[in-house]
Amino acid sequence: MSDGKVLVDQRDGYVVITLNRPDKLNAFTPSQSTSLMEALDEADDDPDCRAVVLTGAGRGFCAGQDLGEREPGGEAIDLGNTIETFYNPLIRRIRSLQLPVICAVNGVAAGAGANVALACDIVLAARSARFIQAFAKIGLVPDSGGTWTVTHLIGEARAKAIMLTGAPVDAETAEQWGMIWKAVDDDGLMSEAHEMASKFAKAATVGLGLTKTLIQAAGANDLDKQLDMERDAQRDAGYTPDYAEGVSAFLEKRPPAFTGRR
Ligand code: LHQ
């Protein structure tokens, strides 16, 4: 697949995908974006892959769209096309993957880079990392689902403040606000991400995928609709071999050996 701008490291039961243009803080170019989508598609197609870790090489996670691609004084291009071609499918892909997607934010996450990180299921951030809704500073609007995701996570008051000003949010503040799961020491970030992914690699994957779908649907549903969805998902989970195994393991007082399969 690759020109090396996205690294894919297959581990035992999970994959680590690393954005790899460290000299440009891993800002997205079209070819890098395509490689990222391919890596996620492969994770989705691989029955042995039961979790994804997304991170960045070097001192940044991702500085958003590569602004070097837009020539100063050059003719305006249709940014809606860029969004439609890459960013929207990427966010939909992360959200629809029936696997936990952990983002290990190793450094600055700006623009679309911030919102791709925040679209992931569990966000760990190095204490030195910052989230910057940089769009206002270049005359754009937040994209990659940011106006939806961030508003759901931290509420309108904080979302408006950080999006209208572009003020950076450090990892500890992000944790306090509930924008991410956890701020961790820089040198412990990747070990924590690996530890979490290794646990997911042995988990009841179908149930986790259904749980992710339910939580994502909750915001748009009333309680009645959500109760119906939970019923249907529980029916589905209840027919998996992992449910039978989970109950047997509990009764036999031993750890479960989940397959993650249907
Ligand atoms: C970069 C970038 C970058 C290229 C740092 N591009 N080189 C969607 C649809 C279509 C089009 C438009 O956009 C979008 C969505 C978006 O993502 S829009 C938002 C785009 N991102 C930004 O506006 C962030 C721009 N970057 C920054 O503000 C700073 O670089 C941050 C605050 C992220 C980091 O600052 P520093 O730690 O001081 O690093 P730096 O600025 O020195 O950057 C290091 C290098 O990376 C530098 O290259 P150089 O060759 O001079 O060493 C930067 O030019 C390059 N770089 N971001 N987005």
Image (tube, rainbow, N blue to C red):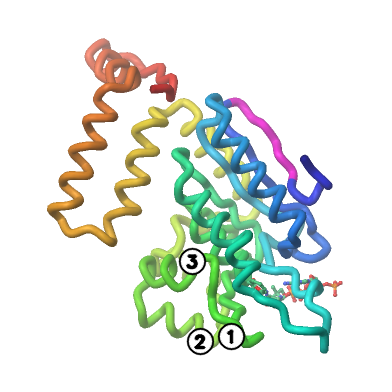
Q: Do the residues labelled 1 and 3 touch (CB within 8 Å)?
A: no
User: Can you tell me which quadrant of the image ligand 1 is in?
Assistant: bottom right
Q: Which of 190 and 223 is in front in this view?
A: 223
Name the residue tied to disc 2.
Answer: 164
Q: Are marks 1 and 2 in contact (CB under 8 Å)?
A: yes
Label 3 residue SS: loop
Which one is earlier in the sequence, the residue at label 1 or at label 2?
Answer: 1
Which one is earlier in the sequence, the residue at label 3 or at label 2?
Answer: 3
Name the residue tied to disc 3.
Answer: 145
Query: Is residue 193 one of those drawn in magenta?
Result: no
Three-letter amino acid code of the residue under disc 2:
Leu
Report the residue that reaches farthest toward the left. Answer: 224
Three-letter amino acid code of the residue under disc 1:
Ala
| Highlighted range, magenta | 7-12
Relative side of 34 to 203, left or right: right
Q: Residue 136 carries which label?
A: 1
Q: Crowdedness of circle 2 by 10 Å Cα count: few (<14), some, many (20+)?
A: some
